[in-house]
Image (spheres, rainbow, N blue to C red):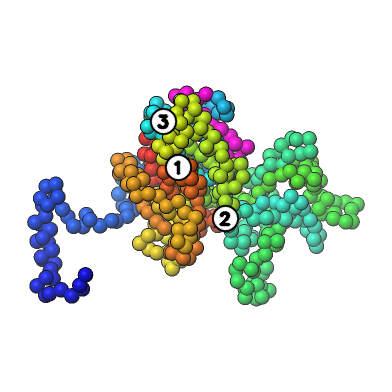
Amino acid sequence: MTIAMAQNDIMTQNDILAQNDKCNNNFKGEYINFMDLTYKKTNVYKVADKKLLDEISAYGEGYKKFLDNSKTEREAVETTVKMVEAKGYKPLVLGTKIKKGDKLYYNNRGKNLLLLKVGSANIAENGIRILVAHVDSPRLDLKQVPIFEKSSIAYAKTHYYGGIKKYQWLTIPLALHGVVVLQDGTKVSVNIGEDDSDPIFYITDLLPHLSQEINEKPVSKAFPAENLNLILGSIPMENNDKDAVKLNVLRILNEKYGITEEDFLSAELEAVPQVKAKDVGLDRSFIAGYGHDDRVCAYPEITATLETETEQTVLTVLADKEEIGSEGNTGMQSIIIADIIDQVAQSFGVSSALVRSKSMCLSADVTAGFDPHFASAFEEKNASYMNFGVTMNKFTGSRGKSGSNDASAEYIGHLRQVFAKDNVIWQTSELGRVDLGGGGTVAKFLASLNIDTVDLGVPVLSMHAPYELISKADIYQAHKAFSAFIK
């Protein structure tokens, strides 16, 4: 292709306008405006009428309540079970026959939940509509032998879970959530810090007057993980010289929960931010909260599943352990999702392989919202913007798309039609600029079952921080997208 052009081959602006007018019948007899050939993202608030604004606001209120009641994966499952039972869902028993019209849930060990709504459509032709999100979030887990005393202060040692910036967890109010299984098998629920009358927990930082040496270290090394210790107390037990403060802490725990130190061996206790979800900004357009990643996608999946009338069979999965690779029997690498698909297929005398090949999945996970304060981390044309709707990531991974499910053009083409039909406002993005970093989702595990899958989720600012930020407009568009998909 030659670059040089003769002068008389160069079109002026007037020539272009004239040519545009001549295009009236060039394509199916329809007028062509050349500007319609370009792609532009849509700001939800620039096209929203009062009805949509009211819906966005009301939906945000419901989400905040869900988030505050679901600070751990166990609590998210418990909260969701209450929601679905109120809508007539019953426990699913593995190995039993499933029939049309069934609304079932399978509670996998209290940390992974699968919702099944069986429609009238032929699953041999239509497969299953699958929605997947995870309900675990970055946090600080108590170690199995956590309590120690030093300088007359009792502490609890922690082991961080998922990808965190350690310094963000210093000097913020923390609450302790989880379960302890006692020697006799009794399971005790623990929740300390959320009630206004409760104490909170705290991790100290060094004052700036003495932190010159720390300031010179890279952030990754300046805050050792072994120093992320929660303050438990400082009052010594009477008539004890050795570990008197530790003993007093154990006495308090024993009186309140019946716990001994050995019971921590069979405990899952998580230190999470004590703060509640709150509106942000004078216009209240954002929500700050702990655990947006990925409960901001789980909640619209749940509401879409419960509220949408559909003939399709719908399977909605709330998974555990995504933040550490989706491992274990409650993560998305567990065979439980394949087992339930098999059970559905067998109940209707259909090949499970055929059902999976006809099924479609939205892997709902958050993506990085564009932050102008850190613009160099993004490639702006392919970034996700706040208030511009739910975001599709055709691929995630890192570097050369490593570890990614790169969804097909055909599947995305299908979803474009689905979203257009229901006026869903959506956008596409990549997770930052190429070669900077990257991240993975559960999409590849669904795709490995021969199911068409793509990532679709809500953009987040300050992702993985103890207090993240999302747009009310974006989460509502996620609800609309999931509803359109399962219809």
Earlier sequence position, callout 3 versus callout 2 = 3
User: Where 19 falls versus 365 (above or below)?
Assistant: below
Query: Is residue 68 visible from the viewing direction of this image?
Result: no
Q: Which residue is mark 1?
A: 450
- Picture residue at 59% right of the left edge, 54% below the top: 162
Quarter that holds the C terminus:
top left
Mark number displayed over residue 123: 3
State yes or no: discs 1 and 3 in contact (Cβ < 8 Å): no
Task: Tell me the quarter of the picture where residue 215 sits.
Answer: bottom right
Q: Magenta includes 107?
A: yes
User: Where 297 falls versus 344 (above or below)?
Assistant: below
What's the amino acid at mark 3? Answer: Ile
Q: Magenta includes 421?
A: no
What's the amino acid at mark 2? Answer: Pro
Count residues near mark 2 (Cα–Cα under 10 Å), then give few for <14, some for 14-19, many for 20+. many
C-alpha gap between disc 3 and disc 2: 42 Å
The mark lying in front, picked from 3 and 2, is 3
Secondary structure of residue under mark 2: loop
Secondary structure of residue under mark 3: helix
Q: What is the x, y in percent for residue 6?
A: 12, 74
Quarter that holds the N terminus:
bottom left
Q: Which residue is mark 2?
A: 466
State yes or no: discs 3 and 2 in contact (Cβ < 8 Å): no
C-alpha gap between disc 2 and disc 1: 36 Å
Range of the magenta residues? 97-113
Q: What is the x, y in percent for residue 395?
A: 43, 54
- Picture residue at 51% right of the left edge, 39% below the top: 317
